[in-house]
Image (cartoon, rainbow, N blue to C red):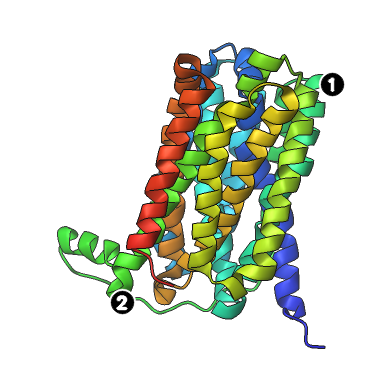
Amino acid sequence: MKTPFNHKISYLLSLGIIVKLLVDTSSQLFNPFLTIIASGVGISAVSMGGIVGVRSLLGLSAPLIGSFSDRIGYRKVMQISLVITGAGLLIAGLSKNPLLFASGIILTGIGQTGFIPNIQAHVSSKLPYHRRAMGIGILEYSWALAGMVGLLAAGFLIEEFTWRTPFNILGVLLLISSILFYSLPESKLKKHEKSNLPLKERIMSFVHLGTKARSAWGTIILQCFTMFSIMHLMIIHGGWLVEEYNLSASALGTIALILGFTDLTASVTVSLFVDKIGKKKSVIIGLIGMIGGFLLLPVLNNGILPAVIGLIIPRTFFEFALVSNIALASEQVPDQRGKVLSLCSAAGLLGITAASVLGPLSYYNLGITGLALICLSSAVVALGVILIMVKE
């Protein structure tokens, strides 16, 4: 029986999952523990949301990093990014004042921006399109495992030691991971000629995505609204559960485990079926499921068990939509794959930035009903974008 991947691809995916698990854990760390970390640093939850928002705003540099990686190679950029992320986490974990903490978190934003789209581009460059969703879906197991393993462990470490402990451990592990990436082969790079064009024309050339530009930009815009819709809820879901159900850090870690398991289920489903269903159709299914979940969330906010179910529904469908869209975007402009996926990452991080700032404000001013309505509106916009702009 013919296996879907050879041993080199299997090794790439295995290493990619492990290292991306660490990066994703550092990225998700604030979702359940934002109020706890904010208290430890000595600032308000809204201020901490602002710091996370600034971190995400650095994702706007992703297209420049992606264009650069198309020239020098994905592996080199990933290694540099892991060093930056690890250093930022250690600075935050060892900080003695809010300013130094914020500086470390902002530094992690630069590193995460460089690593995530480039590991996606590196995997995509090694796989044909008819197996792309399978490969990306497997790689994205890391996002789910971050909730199942990473955040559960973080909750235990925070409760047993201090909020600083997860930052310090993740920082050291990511610095070690940058060395392991030397074992990966570099992708074949397209030769780029030096440009002597004026700055304006060079900028226009940078944003031009060829004959499929409308569809490519559709996947990028879609990423922004999809990420905003879910992160507007997830950035403050820990604060919501603590506020209304008085949960501890370890209990929040357990809920992260449950959410991680649902993410893993969605990623496995993507890796098994999306190539057969079709990437665009799968994104549409995911967005419709998110909209239904946001409609149910206020109704289910009448006990800890239904509240968690209310989180699971949109989160599961989000993962399905997100991973399918990455696979869809990866083949829009194949010779500029790093740029397109980096633009997707930048757009997603722009959505996260807005959600990080607005999520806590929405919850404390409008409650869970107002929060859910804003999430729903963004998901509806994303659905309109894929129906009107995006082609398979």
217 sits to left or right of 29: left
209 sits to left or right of 266: left
Is the C terminus in the top left, top right, bottom left or bottom right quadrant?
Answer: bottom left
Image quadrant where residue 152 sits: top right
Number of on-image labels: 2
Q: Give the residue displayed 37% in from the left and 47% down from the top.
A: 381
Image quadrant where residue 298 sits: top right
Q: Please give the label number shown on residue 193.
A: 2
Residue type highlighted by circle 1: Glu
In percent of width and height, residue 293 lies at 57, 40
Towards the viewer: 368 or 228: 368
**Marked residue nearer the N-terminal end (1 or 2):** 1
Q: Secondary structure at mark 1?
A: helix
Q: Please give the label number shown on residue 160.
A: 1
Let me know if residue 14 appears in the view. Answer: yes
Q: Give the residue displayed 84% in from the left and 21% down from the top.
A: 160
**Up-down relation of residue 250 to residue 380 (above or below):** above
269 sits to left or right of 286: right
Q: Give the residue displayed 69% in from the left and 35% down from the top.
A: 309
